[in-house]
Image (cartoon, helix red, strand yellow):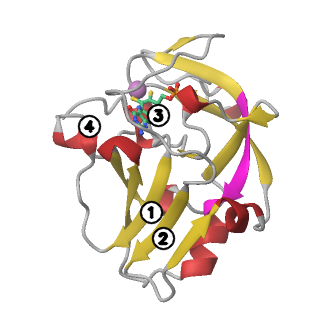
């Protein structure tokens, strides 16, 4: 074993790198067009906001290059996304200091629970583009969460809301027995 950080493994335990981009979807949700789409930012916040496609696109965008890790054991390296940093959305709504949890809500009644601290500090975005192109519907277009600090089930496709609260409400897979936190580096796949 070495303490040299450059020797740290790139891929979490048990993961296999793929060049493909598998589509992983529970059910067949009816998803929104750009015109129908909106994002509700609410809960324990000073300034609840509903963004539509136009108001989202008025916010500052950035590129986000990251590795993603699916609980079914594929990892994809150096994926390139573009969207609005969660820090921008947090500045907008100003969650109360007690609101440490976020429930991501998506079309098709899909939800995923996260710690706010795993979304902030440049760690996550609300993405509208993958690989320089508009996000394909199968991968969550028009808009999805990309929160790669955790297994990729946390990155809700067809994102429609972020609910900030002091309570941690379990999401879709978390209720069905997936790990509540889902750290790929700690192999937190199931409860
Ligand atoms: N709304 C929604 N988001 C979702 C899912 C889903 O079924 N519905 N699947 C999750 C899972 S398990 C994974 S691994 C990733 C897969 O994203 P991809 O289909 O773009 O690879 O999306 C996550 N987000
Ligand atoms: Mo997944």
Q: Of circles 3 and 1, which is in front?
A: 1
Secondary structure found at label 1: strand
Determine if the magenta segment contains residue 65.
no
Residue 94: % across, % down: 53, 82
Identify residue for label 1. Answer: 162
Residue 72: % across, % down: 38, 18
* Residue 41 disc label: 2
Nearer to us in this view, 38 or 63 = 38
Secondary structure found at label 4: helix
Q: Are marks 1 and 2 in contact (CB under 8 Å)?
A: yes
Residue found 44% across the figure and 62% down from its top: 162
Identify residue for label 4. Answer: 173
Q: Is residue 52 left or right of residue 98?
A: right
Q: Distance between the Cα atoms at labels 3 and 1?
A: 17 Å
Residue found 53% across the figure and 15% down from its top: 22
The image quadrant that residue 163 belongs to is bottom left
Q: Are marks 1 and 4 in contact (CB under 8 Å)?
A: no
């Amino acid at each position: 074993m070495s303490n040299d950080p450059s020797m740290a493994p790139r891929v979490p335990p048990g993961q296999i790198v793929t060049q493909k981009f598998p589509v992983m979807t529970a059910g067949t949700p009816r998803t929104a067009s750009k015109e129908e789409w909106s994002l509700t930012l609410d809960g324990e916040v000073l300034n609840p906001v509903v963004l539509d496609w136009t108001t989202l696109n008025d916010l500052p965008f950035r590129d986000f290059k990251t590795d993603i890790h699916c609980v079914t054991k594929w990892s994809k390296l150096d994926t390139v996304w573009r969207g609005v940093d969660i820090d921008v959305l947090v500045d907008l709504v100003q969650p109360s200091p007690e609101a440490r949890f976020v429930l991501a809500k998506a079309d098709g009644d899909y939800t995923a629970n996260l710690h706010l601290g795993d979304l902030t500090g440049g760690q996550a975005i609300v993405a509208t583009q993958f690989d320089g192109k508009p996000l394909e519907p199968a991968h969550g277009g028009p808009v999805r969460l990309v929160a790669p600090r955790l297994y990729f089930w946390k990155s809700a496709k067809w994102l429609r809301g972020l609910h900030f609260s002091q309570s941690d409400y379990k999401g879709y897979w978390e209720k069905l027995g997936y790990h509540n936190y889902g750290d790929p580096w700690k192999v937190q796949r199931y409860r």
